[in-house]
């Protein structure tokens, strides 16, 4: 973690959970406006097209989800709440191939915007 990141985590300890996701291979997209970062999206791809996603708008407003590789992607798991709680749930989520991993499709998963993709 660089100096700026360490300072941010010291000031806002809940951001340390995002560092855990980054260490686990997650990728991050920072959405900025004239005042700075307004939202952070993160994702981790699994073999077979499975995708874990996180959207953070504040320390108290976060959403995590898992989708399968279907067409359209099916929503298999979702959690909303405080950043620390949602990240904890994502970290504890079994890998897609695990016996206890969620498999029941609850609905259609939202599409994640990826750099270079068209909408």
Image: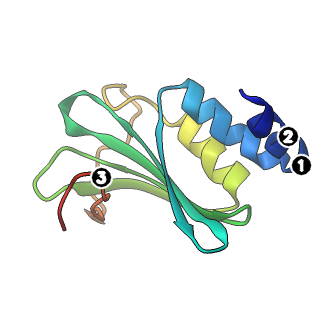
Q: Residue at x 72, y 49 (%)?
A: 84
Q: Are marks 1 and 2 in contact (CB under 8 Å)?
A: yes
Q: Residues within 10 Å of mark 3 (few under 14, many from 20)?
A: few
Q: Are marks 1 and 3 in contact (CB under 8 Å)?
A: no
Q: Residue at x 85, y 40 (%)?
A: 7
Q: Residue at x 36, y 27 (%)?
A: 99
- Judging by the rendered image, the residue that carries numbered circle 2 is 7
Q: Is residue 58 toward the left or the right of residue 118 in the image?
A: right
Q: Is residue 33 toward the left or the right of residue 83 in the image?
A: left
Q: Residue at x 77, y 39 (%)?
A: 4
The residue nearer to you, when weighing 11 against 85, is: 11
SS for dot 3: loop
- Judging by the rendered image, the residue that carries numbered circle 1 is 11
The residue nearer to you, when weighing 112 against 87, is: 112
Q: In the picture shown, does residue 19 fall above or below 102?
A: above
Tell me the quadrant of the picture where the N terminus can be found.
top right
């Amino acid at each position: 973690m660089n100096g700026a990141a360490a300072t941010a985590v010291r000031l806002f300890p809940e951001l340390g959970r995002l560092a855990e996701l980054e260490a686990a291979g997650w990728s991050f997209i920072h959405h900025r406006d004239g005042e700075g970062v307004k939202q952070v999206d993160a994702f981790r791809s699994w073999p077979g097209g499975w995708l874990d996603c996180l959207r953070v708008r504040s320390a108290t407003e976060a959403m995590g989800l898992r989708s399968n590789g279907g067409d359209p992607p099916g929503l298999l798991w979702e959690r909303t709440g405080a950043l620390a709680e949602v990240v904890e749930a994502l970290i504890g989520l079994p890998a897609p191939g695990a016996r206890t991993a969620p498999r029941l499709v609850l609905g259609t998963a939202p599409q994640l915007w990826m750099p270079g993709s068209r909408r």
